[in-house]
Amino acid sequence: MSNNNFLLNYACFPSKTKGRYFKEPEDENRSCFQRDRDRIVHSNAFRKLEYKTQVFINYEHDYYRTRLTHSLEVAQIARSIARRLGLNEDITECIALAHDLGHPPFGHAGEDALKKSVQDLNLDNEKYEFDHNVQAIRILTYLEQKHADFDGMNLSWEVIEGVAKHNGPLLGQNAESSTNNQLLLKYNEKYDLKLEEFSSIEAQVASIADDIAYSVHDLDDALRANLVTIEDLLNVPLIGKMFKDVRSGYSELPQSKLIHESLSGTIGTMISDVVFSD
């Protein structure tokens, strides 16, 4: 089990979890959040992310990122930030790994197509709107059909809450726009996700890690696909300076290594900015 001695008082402690919807005996060797992570990684939904695109269609080249590789990269960045902030790395990783489970194929274009196709569909006399975040909650709590005693993955409350609100509150004055998604509101009645409140710091870290990962890695894919060039980026704040600094230090560096060193440095700078900002 994780050593809680390194967690600061604002972290999520496994010992303080609100538990699972369906009660289960504790595991002697793993904390509740470690078990949650393992269930996510071994789920059918997680494996299916391999064939869901982030930006590029995956048959164009096996180098380009998919939702699966993106989720793994988000989890790595999220753990790095959590470790430096004294947060619980395990639940941070859980939320990072699960945050994209509800995405359909073909990226946001796929989601827009699904929204259009179901806009006139009524579900239990309620208007139904497809939302990838709500779909992730459906997968975690019902659609994943593997366990004998319950539907879904029966994850800890804190993980479900974190996935639902990793981008912020969904109701009330702190929400960017209050949700009227009837499915999510019904899940809230069942799980009391406190949609009007901010999520745990760990969930917020997972969201920041998502922003860092897609900002840098989508650029990496675009460079490899020759959609943009290094010269196009030299006047872009942060990333342009990073390319210039690496070039000045390694004048004969091959382009592939120049890209890697520059983007790696950009990720490190972004992480440090998160950790040390006021």
Image (cartoon, rainbow, N blue to C red):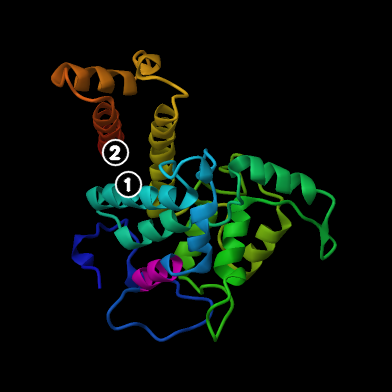
Quadrant (top left/top right/bottom left/bottom right) for the C terminus: top left
Which corner quadrant of the image does residue 254 belong to? top left
Residue highlighted by disc 1: 77
Q: Mark 1 or mark 2, which is nearer to you?
A: 1
Residue highlighted by disc 2: 271
- Check disc 2 and give the amino acid type: Ile
Q: Nearer the viewer, residue 86 or 214?
A: 214
- Check disc 1 and give the amino acid type: Ile
Magenta stretch: give its range: 32-40
Q: Nearer the viewer, residue 207 or 240?
A: 240
Q: Is residue 144 left or right of residue 158?
A: right
Q: Is residue 100 left or right of residue 259?
A: right
Residue drawn at x 57%, y 71% is 144
Pinpoint residue 149: horizontal percent, then vertical percent: 55, 86
Pinpoint residue 185: horizontal percent, then vertical percent: 68, 59
Pinpoint residue 102: horizontal percent, then vertical percent: 58, 56
Quadrant (top left/top right/bottom left/bottom right) for the N terminus: bottom left
Label 1: few (<14), some (14–19) or many (≥20) C-alpha neighbours in 10 Å: many
